[in-house]
Image: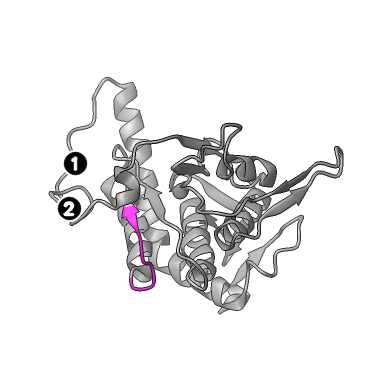
Amino acid sequence: MTNRLYYQSNIECNDIFTEDFKNLLVNLHDKFNNEVKEIRKDRLANQEKARNGTMPSPLAKSDANGEWEIKDLPEDLRTPGIEISGPASIASMLINALNPGPGGVRAEGDLDDDEDAAGHTLEDSILAARNRMQATLGTLSFDNPKTGKHYELQTGKIPFFMHRERGLHLDEPMVKIDGSPIAATILGTALTLFLVEENNIKKEMVFISIYLKLNQLGRQNFIIIYLLKLRILSLKFLTLI
């Protein structure tokens, strides 16, 4: 099945694109590709209506946007404190975000932002996945070859990750299945949940949240919720924001 998938990267990534992960991407693409196309058609149609003065009406109730609630809000989200945001692909920035500040105070949470803060290239996605993985294992470090400065993750509990993924209207053109690019949402969410957490549960569990935009189509959020359900049995802490 993996011979259906082709990717082109300027950096080495065999540790990311394993046979199991490539099989997973092919299966997810097969399951959701037609749905993604329909969601994008609806998006374009709604944009055209809005340009002509017709505002969208409320969405019909579904599992994604109907009446639902979580049983218990995790303690991490009940704790007020500093929350910081930035790209996970730049190791030095991620280390600084996760380490205590000059006053010794560590942020409570880090918004791992692949939507607005990332470079939206395959290389960014690979570096971000690798950095997240090493951060949760406590092994993340970086040496700047230009300045000679060394960055290292300090010991202790790191902030919880709140992962924000790219919108479903975006593709990752450097990863193709049967010649068609995979949806960036599927690739990025799978990288976070299936690779980062696979290594994370081997050591100390770090709290992770998935940031869902409430103004998105319920069908788009359903795709991410499906990915979460595939991993729900192996994740100790998981919430939707």
Q: Position of residue 113 (x, y in %)?
A: 51, 42
Q: What number of labels is visible?
A: 2
Name the residue rendered at 26%, 20% in the picture: 53
> Mark 2 = which residue?
62
Q: Magenta stretch containing residue 166, yes or no?
A: no
Residue 79 location in percent, x, y?
33, 42
* Pick the front one: 154 or 134: 154
State which quarter of the image contains the C terminus.
Answer: top left
Pointers 1 and 2 in contact (CB under 8 A)?
yes
Crowd band around label 1 with a 10 angstrom C-alpha radius: few (<14), some (14–19), many (20+): few
21 relative to 7 in the view: left or right:
left
Which label is found at residue 59? 1
Please state which amino acid type lies under the numbered disc 1.
Leu
Q: Residue furthest top?
A: 53
**Residue 185 x, y percent position in the rendering:** 46, 52
Residue found at x 34% / y 41%? 213
Question: Looking at the image, which is closer to me, 241 or 28?
Answer: 241
Compared with residue 106, is residue 18 higher up or lower down, i.e. above or below?
Answer: below
Which label is found at residue 101? none
| Image quadrant in which the N terminus is located | bottom right
- For this view, does 208 lie left or right of residue 11? left
Observer-nearest of 57 and 10: 10
Q: Which residues, given as a range, are shown in magenta? A: 233-239
> What secondary structure predominates along the stretch shown in magenta?
loop
Mark 2: which secondary structure?
Answer: loop
**At x 70% / y 69%, what residue is drawn?**
14
